Each structure stands twice: as C-alpha cells, then as structure tokens.
Amino acid sequence: MNFDDTPQEAAFRAEARKWIDANAPREFEEELSKSSLGRIKLRKHNIVEVAKAWQKRKAEGGWVCLHWPREYGGRGATPVERVIWQQEEGIYFKLTSPFQIGEGMCGPTVMTYGSEADKRRYLPKIASGEEIWCQLFSEPAGGSDVAGLRTRAERDGDHWIINGQKIWTSGAHYSDYGILITRTDPNVPKHKGLTMFYIDMKSPGVEVKPIKQANGMQEFNEVFFTDLRIPDSQRLGAVGDGWNVSLTTLMNERMSIGARLATGLPELFDFCSNLMTDDGLAIDDRATRSKLANWAVKASGLKYTSYRAISALSKGERPGPENSIGKLVAGSMLQDIAMYAMDLQGASGMLTDPETAEAAGQFQAMLMSSPSTRIAGGTDEILRNIIAERVLGLPGDIRVDKDVPFNKIPTRGR
C-alpha cells in the first residue's frame, strides 16, 4: 500500500482544504471540539438546523455525497477522494450526523432499487440535507434477528396497509422519510416473506415516540404504524425480496459506521497528560502508560486496516471484512477507555455537567452511549459470526428455524 497522495489526489486535497478554510462555520469550532461521542449538542443552537445549514453550503459547493453520480446530487468522485474530503472536514464532520443514515444507508438502497423517477426526486434532496431519512428495521421482539420482524404489510389493490412497531430508530423524530422492511407473507420461511418500502414519516398512521437515553439525549425512537396506507409505487425491490434489499442497506450501514467510529483514545491521552493524581500526572504512571500503549497499538491497527479497505476501493475492488473488524474492535475499545477515564477521575466521575465535570464530562457521555455503539449496525456477537463464517470459514451457527414458515415458529415456551 502507498499512503502518499498521487498528484491528482494532492490537488483535490488542496482544493478541499481551501474550500473548508473559506466556508467552515468557525463559530461552532470550540463546541464541536469539546463534544464527545454520545453528546453532540450546541448550547444556543439546534444541532439539526445548524447541520442543515452546513449541508446546504456544502451542497452548493459540490461537497456532499461525493461518490454519488452528479445527476443524483453527488460529485462522481473516487472512493479515495471521498476519504480525503472526510479527513479534511475534520470536526465539522460531526455536523453531518443527522444525514448519515440517509447518505450511507437509505440513499444507496434507493439508488439500487428505486425507479429512475424516485432517484431523481429523492436522492438530490438527501444529498443536500433538505430531506432527512431514517431506517425502520429493528423491532422489540426481534433483537438482532432482523428477519424475525412482525410488522406486517397487507395488499389492498394498488396500495399496502401497514401495522406494527419499530424501535431504536435513530432520528425518526426529525426525519422526513424512511425505508421500512415489513412481512408480507408469513407462510414462508422468515427470510423469504419480507418486502421493503419507503414511507413519508409525516403520513397519517405513523406515530413517533422518542426514547430517553441514559446520557440524557433522545436520539432513538419507537415508531408505531396503525393502518398506514401507502401506494405500491413506494415499494423497493420485488414483493418477498425484502431480505436481499435489506442486505444492501446493512452492508452500507456497517461500512458507514465502521469506517469512522471513534475510540476515545486521543481524548484519553490529552486527559491523562493533564490530570494530576495523588502520585503526580496520570501519564507518568507506569500502569496508565501501559494501558495507553496497548490502546495506541489497537488504534494504529484500526487505522491501517481501514487503509487496506481504502486501497481496495481505489483499485475498484470490493473491500473485505475490514469494516466489521473495525466496528467490533473500536466499539469495545471505546467502552473500555471511557470506563478507565472514569476510574481515574474517582468520585468526580459521577459528574456529567460540562461546566463542572473534568474533561467536560466527555467520558461520562462516552460510557453512557457506548452500549448502543456495540449494538448499532450489528451487535458484537453478530459481527463475530460474520467474521468467523465468512472470513475464517468456520461452521455456521445452528439455525433451527431457517426453513420453517414464519407463522409456525414457536413464540412462547419450549
């Protein structure tokens, strides 16, 4: 692998850096620098409105969804140019959080399975941030088993009637549209009776209820569907082929999450460099230095493993399991780092108020949100199965319900 920019890439990086220097919303730089994973919040401004303004400015400059075709609101850039842009955008990338699901998951699904009219209608507005999308997959009874969903869609002429519930839907409370996977045939095995749609989140029959999180945020939601009526033209893919459609979404989800997942190491290193303990600076303690060194090695491994994926993309190849590995390692590492930082803080680790807590409560916020990081986009167990089965070639888990019609799968007792 060659980590140096080619002349063309260097020119692209210089162009990106010049545009960001001239257009970045510097008034939010300090707050964004101090915000941590799990608490990206602005004191005097609505984060979604600020994010929309930044996204619109980027869209006008041609710096959104860089790898998408121009006719759909992108730039037709190479995968490496997309990575260069992300590197140069830096902390302002935090302002893209409301759009990541639309850009990274819903948009690619619409691009693959939507009609040409749908692509030209919806994709440019996803890219510009004018319309925000969410992903309606998880359900209370399904856990990590996406195919165990119970939200049902029943055909009524040229329309579908949808009833059911989704949970842990990020951003549903401010989203305009969403992609929704439903069960349309309970008489076949669970992976075969699914159908994907996209819906208007403001439609009659859609109710969104925010879920209060341990860290004080409300990013996740329950979504209820009561006789939601949508036209068949909002179907993505064939009837009964929803599982294959969902794989496009899930593949892009893991790529989006795994590629830029924070670990908290830079924040911990700075914290230890300034924290005075009873025995002196924390960074001078041998045990602390040993932990930092171990995490630094992991972070370096994550960085260069990610570069392998970038290198493959630059050659037109499909990246391997790097993103599943990256998310699995980074998710647990984030949690371990947050717990260690709180141990170093002692009793003050209970404080969360940014005005009084050490390190502005960054690690408290990280710890509170870290469990969700290890669940979103595939739990640790799911990712381990993927790596074991699809990379190492180990035998798959026993799945006794794989070929059983969904309505014959026992739901209570054994």
Image (spheres, rainbow, N blue to C red):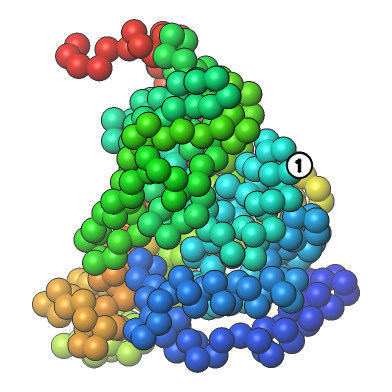
- Viewer-proximal residue among 168 and 223: 223
Which residue is tagged 1? 116
Tell me which residue sits at (53%, 27%) in the image. 159
Quadrant including the C terminus: top left
The answer to whether residue 257 is seen in the rendering is no
Q: Is residue 285 left or right of residue 25?
A: left
User: Is residue 9 placed above or below 279 in the rendered structure?
Assistant: above
Residue 127: x %, y % from top left? 65, 61
Q: Is residue 70 left or right of residue 60?
A: right
Three-letter residue code for mark 1: Glu
User: Is residue 164 placed above or below 98 in the rendered structure?
Assistant: above
The answer to which quarter of the image holds residue 237 is top right
Q: Is residue 199 left or right of residue 310?
A: left
Tell me which residue sits at (43%, 9%) in the image. 187
Residue 400: x %, y % from top left? 38, 12
Label 1: few (<14), some (14–19) or many (≥20) C-alpha neighbours in 10 Å: few
Tell me which residue sits at (43%, 38%) in the image. 137
The answer to which quarter of the image holds residue 211 is bottom left
Q: Residue furthest right?
A: 7
The answer to which quarter of the image holds residue 44 is bottom left
The answer to whether residue 363 is seen in the rendering is yes
Tell me which residue sits at (72%, 75%) in the image. 60
Q: Is residue 298 left or right of residue 14?
A: left
Residue 359: x %, y % from top left? 30, 83
Numbered disc total:
1
- Viewer-proximal residue among 318 and 68: 68
- Viewer-proximal residue among 28 and 118: 118
- Viewer-proximal residue among 147 and 332: 147
Q: Residue furthest left?
A: 347
